[in-house]
Amino acid sequence: MVNDVIFYRHVFPSWLLAGTTLRKFGNIAQDDGKDKLSRKIKSKINLILTLNQIHSSKIINADNINNETKIHTGDGFYTSKAKTLVVIKTADCAPVIIVDIKSKKLLLLHAGRKGLEVGIIRKGIREMLGKGAYISNLRILIGSFIDSCCYSYNMKNSIYLQIVESNIMKEQFFFVGECTSCKNNKYFSHRQGDYERMGTFAMIR
């Protein structure tokens, strides 16, 4: 069986569907990417939402979106609605999933160098708390990204600092821990010359 998607079942409660497509899945940014993903995850979906990503700290409230026709610009989605699948695209930037495991609130972020420099993770955690999440209930997964072995900017250190400075305990967050450039046979990597993108997705069932 071809391993073309990683599902993060070991990190989050069963009510959350979350994962990342791999190189073998193909380019999530293609026109048929959303349909292909929908078929792969085999779960009832009301909306599939993607972003025009701009390396910012702008987060879109998906609870206010009722259709897929409008293209929204930003680098993160918040939602507390069931069956709304949110997707971000990466190829060296870090996908970050933040979940309140008690109140079923979800945040999905695209965190590249520019986004980290303007504090996208710190802002995202503040927004979650502003929506009624509790700091002790948060669980965070940071998917694979380009590490300092292949990139002059230390993404991992910036991500780590923004999380711990937000009073998140070490046992509440998890790094997948693979470098997308080193493992270019598994992941797409912009710095290795790939134009394709992987998709990290999350949905409250």
Image: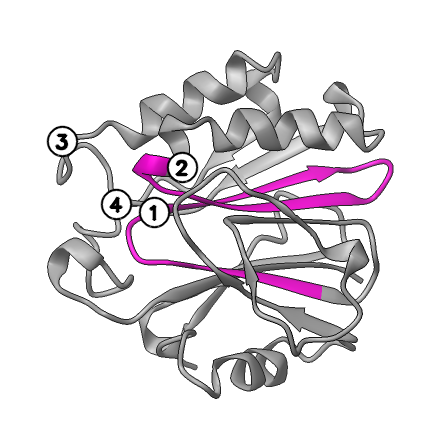
Amino acid type of the residue tagged 2 in the rendering: Gly
Left or right of 125, for residue 5: left
Residue 152's tag is 3
Give the residue displayed 36% in from the left and 27% down from the top. 117
Residue 93's tag is 1
Quarter of the picture holding the C terminus: bottom right
Mark 2 Cα within 10 Å, few/some/many (few <14, many 20+)?
many
Rounded to the nearest whole Å, what is the CA distance between mark 1 and mark 3? 13 Å
Q: Report the span colored magenta.
A: 85-114
Instruction: Give the foreground label among 1 and 2.
Output: 2
Q: Which residue is mark 4?
A: 179
Amino acid type of the residue tagged 3 in the rendering: Ser
Amino acid type of the residue tagged 4 in the rendering: Cys
Instruction: Give the foreground label among 1 and 4.
Output: 1
Rounded to the nearest whole Å, what is the CA distance between mark 1 and mark 4? 10 Å
Do tag 3 and tag 2 residues touch (Cβ < 8 Å)? Answer: no
Instruction: Give the foreground label among 4 and 2.
Output: 2
Q: Which residue is mark 2?
A: 115
Rounded to the nearest whole Å, what is the CA distance between mark 4 and mark 2? 19 Å
Rounded to the nearest whole Å, what is the CA distance between mark 3 and mark 2? 16 Å
Do tag 1 and tag 4 residues touch (Cβ < 8 Å)? Answer: no
Quarter of the picture holding the N terminus: bottom left
Rounded to the nearest whole Å, what is the CA distance between mark 4 and mark 3? 13 Å
Instruction: Give the foreground label among 3 and 2.
Output: 2
Residue 17 against residue 155 in the figure, above or below: below
Instruction: Give the foreground label among 4 and 3.
Output: 3
